[in-house]
Image: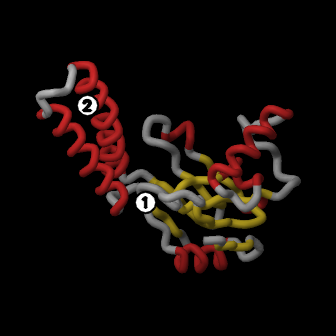
Amino acid sequence: MVYEQRYRFDPKTVLLLVFAGAIVAGALLAPHLSISARTGLVLFFGAGGLLGLVTSLSRRVALRVDADGITFGGTLLRYRASTRRFPWADVEAVVLWRQQTAAGVPWIGILRHRYAPPLPGALTGAGGRGLTTAFTALIGAPDERLLECAKGIDGWSLDTARLATVLGSVAPGVRFVDHR
């Protein structure tokens, strides 16, 4: 049994594309803008809109749950390097939560066993702990261990019922926690 979600056009992405397109069109058509302001707006919003468009059109895997583990698909510009796979032996729970901001971005995270080997690039030392604490507060993660393996549900959607069904089938020892 497999559960897989791919990057695609979701309502938030469509809204982003419309907004970015309107800003770019306004910057190009507004006669009172200086060249530097026009250029900055077109580069910033044009690049953001283009990134959203290409990501949605790529249809790359955003999330995959199968008998071997759970995979978080990477970012567009470094997809292969930023894709992360977590074997079930390292996973204690799959956790959902919502960022406590106006946007209320939903997140999915993997709570790894304390005995699981450290992830490459994990923040260590006093500075790393400080950054972890700050980022935990920023995204509202219920446990700071989730920060090592968390992904915003953005540019794709999550079918919670299907995810729970597949988790129960392929990883019955892994808890599924929904804090949303």
**Left or right: 98 in relation to 158:** right
**Left or right: 108 in relation to 141:** left
Dot 2, crowdedness within 10 Å: few (<14), some or many (≥20)?
many
Percent position of residue 131, x then y: 73, 38
Asked which secondary structure carries label 2, the reply is: helix
Disc 1 + disc 2, Cβ < 8 Å: no
**Left or right: 68 in relation to 28:** right
Percent position of residue 69, x then y: 65, 60
Q: Nearer the viewer, residue 98 or 64?
A: 98
Query: Which of the numbered marks, if any, corresponds to residue 156?
Result: 1
User: Which residue shows up at 59% across the image and 59% down it?
Assistant: 99
Q: Which residue is mark 2?
A: 42
Asked which secondary structure carries label 1, the reply is: loop
Quarter containing the C terminus = bottom right
Identity, as a three-letter code, of the amino acid under mark 1 = Trp
Quarter containing the N terminus = bottom right
Residue 93 higher or lower than 23, as above or below: below
Percent position of residue 134, x then y: 71, 44
Percent position of residue 50, x then y: 30, 40
